[in-house]
Amino acid sequence: MKNVNNQIKAMLDSESSFASCDLYSLTLCTGETYYFADYDEDIIIANKVYKHDALTFKRGQLKLQGMPSVDSLTVTIYCVNEDKVAGESFMQACHTGKISASTLMLSKAYFLEDECIGSVDIFSGNCEVESAGGLAVQLKVKSEIQGLSDPIPVRMFAAQAAYATNNGVVATSSRDTTSMLIPLKPSGKVLRNG
């Protein structure tokens, strides 16, 4: 169920044509949030300024499932070096991993007689950079339930130390208090054969 204010409800019930635009909120893992509008001018909603002259967004259709799975959205973002996020260009932020650890929220703003009367949250999810190069970045935004339908965890941790087996039990071969865990992502072959 979506929260819609009374002005938007009344407009949708009574008007046959109206203007709307997409709004994007990009929240980095540091908590910094950036706001962007796919419109001709900046939009202010709830004291937040959605910039129209920064990044350019082009989104695909939402892919919604009727069963427990990951709803997703593909977004292509066109950027130039002047488009900054967290003190660096947006493209550089994609290459350093700041965008992959972020959350993107898609909302839709509605207008009546050139005045914004409110917005409706449409979709929110975790970003994964699928490609980044030239002037374009392609993001796959997956809903918060990602990982629930996976048979095994996508990211596991493996001991970074020598080990030995003793009757099928794996144990470190020495008392090493400096051993650390490293992330291990199984290959597609392991996932298919397992």
Image (tube, rainbow, N blue to C red):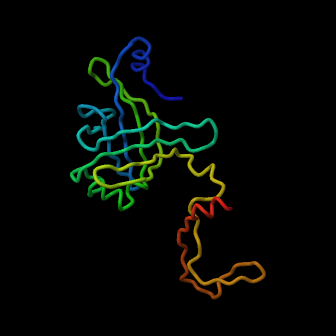
Is 190 left, or right, of 101 in this rendering? right
Is 76 left, or right, of 42 in this rendering? right
Q: Quadrant of residue 74?
A: top left
Image location (x, y in percent) of residue 140 = 45, 47
Image location (x, y in percent) of residue 184 = 55, 68
Image location (x, y in percent) of residue 110 = 36, 25
**Is 52 in front, or is 178?**
52
Q: Quadrant of residue 120?
A: top left
**Is 178 in front, or is 138?**
138
Is residue 54 placed above or below 153 in the rendered structure?
A: above
Is residue 123 placed above or below 81 in the rendered structure?
A: above
**Is 76 in front, or is 124?**
76
Q: Quadrant of the C terminus?
A: bottom right
* Point 39% across, 31% down: residue: 108
Q: Quadrant of the N terminus?
A: top right
* Point 30% across, 59% down: residue: 92
